[in-house]
Amino acid sequence: MEGNHLKYIDKSAFSSNEQLSIAKFSNNMLQFDSSNETLSPFYNNRLLTELHLANNRIKHFFRDWAANKVELELLDLSYNNISTITTDDFVFWKHIVIVNLRNNNIKKIFLNNIESSAKRNYGNRHFVIDVKNNPLSCDCSLYDIVRYFNGDMPVTVYNFIELILGNLTCVQPDGTQGPLINQLDFKTYKCQEDAFFELHKNCQTRCTCYVRPYDKARILDCSYKNIPIFRIDKSKVHFVSMHALVLNFTGNHLKKIPSLDDLQEFNLIELFLSNNQISKVSLDNFPTTLKVPRLDYNVSNFLYRQDFQVFTLSGNPFICDCDNRFLYRLVLGKQHIHKDLKNVKCKDRNIPLLNMTHEQLCPSMFRH
């Protein structure tokens, strides 16, 4: 029945064709009414081995395509208008099943229960799901997809479902093209805070509020907003349990670190201040919860008291003289912990500070 102008198939059209093995209905205009129906017109054809429905107008994945097709080996749904699929759609009976979902309108693939489904994979079934050329959204639902391609799931998942994305990119909330999905890192991937925590949208003016699903840290991103002075508006910061907070002020025109006094209660753990015009930093500016300060391309006089997880300083025009001997000791003492310190250089010398001698740093001390 391929290549006709079929728009409608009665729900009981094939109810008596129990031996139907191959059904080809591609290149039609079929949509199937899904407003009150969860089953397709093929619900009674349990012995189907191939179901071809490519190039139609189908908007939903019908429950019977997986639930009762005990012999199904190929399901072709390419070039339709399906927008959402879930792990539950792919629990088939046959040992190996290929599902072609290329060139649909799939924005979300929910894999949130894929690990538990894989544990129940009796009989070592393996399903190949091809979702190339779909406009997947760069949102919170993408996190488990990124985990999948980062190899962060149990081996039972990969034995259960083979998900084929190809060189698929995701689509940003503003409609612009996002990054290649297979190059994203699940540990750093972020999505909109309000969507993840199911909150009303409430963020600092000119900033964007994200969450990092990996550790549920909230990210206040105010980078590259041409902000010379920044003041925190506490009424526009969500207090979500004790989930940590990350502040990103990279690439502004800040001459000093914004006051963080109002954020002490928000468990601030990371602070990004790279590419600003900050010349001096006081330890009093930092809360004790801070674990990751990034001040590369900013600071000319900095010392820290606690052991940070990540610490970057390279790219700053440090003045290397007797008054800055503490920096020399810091680089020598911490470069094995924080690799970035090996790249710290002096303002007028193109050699790493690590390679300088005491006499080069402070020649006056060695004059007789």
Image: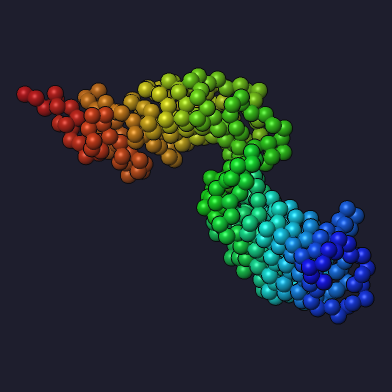
Q: Is residue 135 among the parts visible in the rendering?
A: yes
What residue do we see at 90% from left, 55% from top? 36
Q: Is residue 63 above or below residue 206?
A: below
The color scheme shown is rainbow
Q: Is residue 160 left or right of residue 270?
A: right
Q: Is residue 311 above or below residue 40?
A: above
Q: Name the quarter where the C terminus is drawn.
A: top left
Name the outermost residue toward the front: 4
Image location (x, y in percent) of residue 350: 23, 36
What residue do we see at 66% from left, 34% from top? 240
Image location (x, y in percent) of residue 364: 14, 23
Image location (x, y in percent) of residue 259: 51, 20
Q: Quadrant of residue 39?
A: bottom right
What residue do we see at 68% from left, 70% from top? 98
Image location (x, y in percent) of residue 342: 30, 41
Nearest the viewer among 56 and 368 is 56
Nearest the viewer among 24 and 264 is 24
Name the outermost residue toward the left: 368
Q: Quadrant of residue 234?
A: top right
| Figure disc tally | 0
Q: Is residue 71 left or right of residue 169?
A: right
Q: Is residue 123 among the parts visible in the rendering?
A: no
Q: Name the quarter where the N terminus is drawn.
A: bottom right
Q: Is residue 309 left or right of residue 216?
A: left
Nearest the viewer among 297 and 122 is 297
Nearest the viewer among 153 and 77 is 77
What residue do we see at 26% from left, 29% from top? 347
Q: Is residue 299 left or right of residue 226?
A: left
